[in-house]
Image (spheres, grey):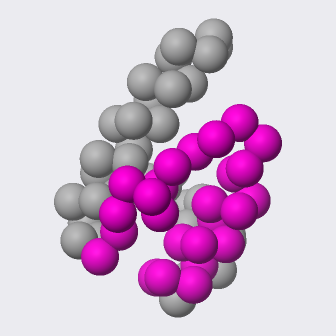
Amino acid sequence: MNTTEVKGNWNEQKGKLKQQFAILTDDDLMLVEGKQDEMFGKLQIKLGKTKEELQKLIASL
């Protein structure tokens, strides 16, 4: 999978997360290269879920 495909997939997942959890903002879901752990931390705080729960949730979208 190339970088364009990864970014495209992530943009699709962001949209689905925002639909499911209206409290999330673009800032909450901003994925900057090397910042994935930080993003998961923000999601954990905002949604009250573990990293594993979030990974499963994102994978199920």
Q: Residue at x 59, y 72 (%)?
A: 42
In x, y percent, where is residue 55? 60, 60
Q: Quadrant of residue 37?
A: bottom right
Q: How many discs mark residues in the rendered view?
A: 0
Specify the farthest residue to the bottom.
Answer: 48
Q: Is residue 36 part of the magenta span, yes or no?
A: yes
Q: Is residue 38 magenta?
A: yes
Specify whether 20 is left or right of 33.
left
Residue under the point 47% across and 63% down: 28
12 w.r.t. 25: above or below: above
Report the magenta residues as a range.
23-47
Residue 49 is situated, as x and y percent measured from the top left of the image, at 56, 83
Q: Residue at x 47, y 36 (%)?
A: 10
Note whether 44 is above or below 61 in the view shown. Answer: below
Residue 53 shows in this picture: no
Position of the N terminus, as image quadrant, is: top right
Q: Nearer the viewer, residue 53 or 29?
A: 29
Name the magenta segment's main secondary structure: helix
Residue at horizontal 51 percent and vertical 26 percent from the top: 7
Whether residue 60 is visible: yes
In the image, residue 25 sits, relative to residue 8, either above or below, namely below
Residue placed furthest toward the front = 27
Of 15 and 34, which appears nearest the observer? 34
Task: List x then y, in percent, for residue 5.
Answer: 51, 16
Query: Where is residue 26 drawn, in percent x and y?
Result: 37, 54
